[in-house]
């Protein structure tokens, strides 16, 4: 029974970390960074990296990180308790011949099963088709809940003279989607696309003929006010006339 509780607690912890990663991604973090920081907060390891500073300096991300830390402490206590009970011999619960033998071998078997469960959870589950489907489902639920408002525009660096570097996402139905950079009109508005991230691929200093696709994340340099106006205008509009 304790072994089953351990596996359930481990799976619940995986789901909590995945929810935290999705929430952090919706605030503008890259998925790989969001996953690492969510696991770091939940496990309490507290890695000091450049990406961690992006969380400390962002109010909503700090709230998400704080919640992951609290839930992580509770999950750690539950895991330790279930492991301790699983490794404790319980001869009285075994009503069959040679129960004394199980009293000595049982804890070792439970330990091996615990190690196997942990290995399978972190080795195979994160990259499985089930995990991808779960992530998409959680992303939809988090968006629908309104707990985190998805961002499509984020300032990364502010320079003098009103210029800066921003990261903007090309949403579904954006007028920029499907157009090459040369015909997007961005260059004429003093907006330079430094790089395009498409899935796991990064196209640095893209050519003028490179087409912009839905879901692309553009790293741009230009006047901050003008870029805000341009990318907010480029957001898709629903039938009621509001931004999606």
Image (spheres, grey):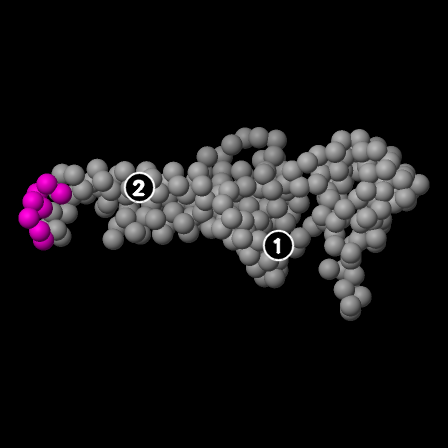
Toward the viewer: 34 or 200? Answer: 200
Q: CA distance from mark 1 to mark 2?
A: 35 Å
Above or below residue 48? Residue 241 is below
Crowding at dot 1, Cα within 10 Å, few <14 / some 14-19 / many 20+, comes out as: some
Residue visible at 71% across and 38% down? 197
Residue visible at 93% across and 41% down? 188
Above or below residue 190? Residue 74 is below
Residue 32 place in picture, x, y as percent: 58, 38
Quarter of the image where the C terminus is located: bottom right
Residue 113 place in picture, x, y as percent: 29, 42
Crowding at dot 2, Cα within 10 Å, few <14 / some 14-19 / many 20+, comes out as: many
- Left/right placement of residue 188 relative to residue 44 reads right
Callout 1: SS? loop
Above or below residue 40? Residue 174 is below
- Left/right placement of residue 150 relative to residue 220 reads left
- The image quarter in which residue 105 lies: top left
- Left/right placement of residue 128 relative to residue 237 reads left
- Left/right placement of residue 73 relative to residue 226 reads left
Q: Residue tagged by mark 2?
A: 114
Toward the viewer: 102 or 48? Answer: 102
Residue visible at 16% across and 43% down? 89
Residue visible at 28% across and 48% down? 3
- The image quarter in which residue 100 lies: top left
Check residue 148 in the rendering and tell me which mark sits there, or answer none. 1
């Amino acid at each position: 029974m304790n072994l089953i509780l351990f596996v359930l607690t481990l799976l619940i912890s995986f789901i909590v970390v995945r929810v935290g990663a999705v929430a952090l991604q919706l605030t503008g973090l890259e998925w790989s960074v969001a996953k690492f920081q969510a696991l770091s907060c939940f496990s309490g390891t507290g890695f000091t990296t450049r990406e961690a500073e992006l969380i400390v300096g962002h109010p909503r991300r700090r709230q998400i990180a704080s919640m992951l830390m609290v839930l992580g402490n509770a999950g750690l206590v539950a895991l330790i308790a279930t492991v301790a009970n699983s490794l404790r011999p319980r001869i009285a619960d075994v009503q069959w011949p040679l129960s004394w033998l199980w009293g000595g071998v049982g804890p070792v078997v439970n330990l091996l099963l615990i190690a196997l469960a942990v290995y399978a959870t972190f080795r195979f589950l994160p990259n499985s088709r089930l995990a991808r489907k779960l992530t998409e489902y959680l992303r939809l639920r988090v968006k629908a809940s309104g707990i985190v408002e998805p961002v499509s525009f984020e300032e990364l660096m502010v320079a003098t003279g009103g210029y800066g570097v921003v990261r903007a996402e090309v949403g579904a139905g954006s007028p920029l989607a499907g157009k090459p950079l040369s015909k997007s009109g961005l260059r004429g508005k003093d907006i330079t696309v430094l790089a395009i991230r498409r899935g796991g691929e990064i196209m640095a200093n893209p050519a003028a003929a490179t087409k912009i696709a839905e879901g692309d994340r553009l790293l741009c340099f230009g006047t901050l006010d003008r870029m805000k106006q341009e990318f907010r205008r480029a957001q898709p509009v629903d039938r009621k006339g509001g931004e999606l």
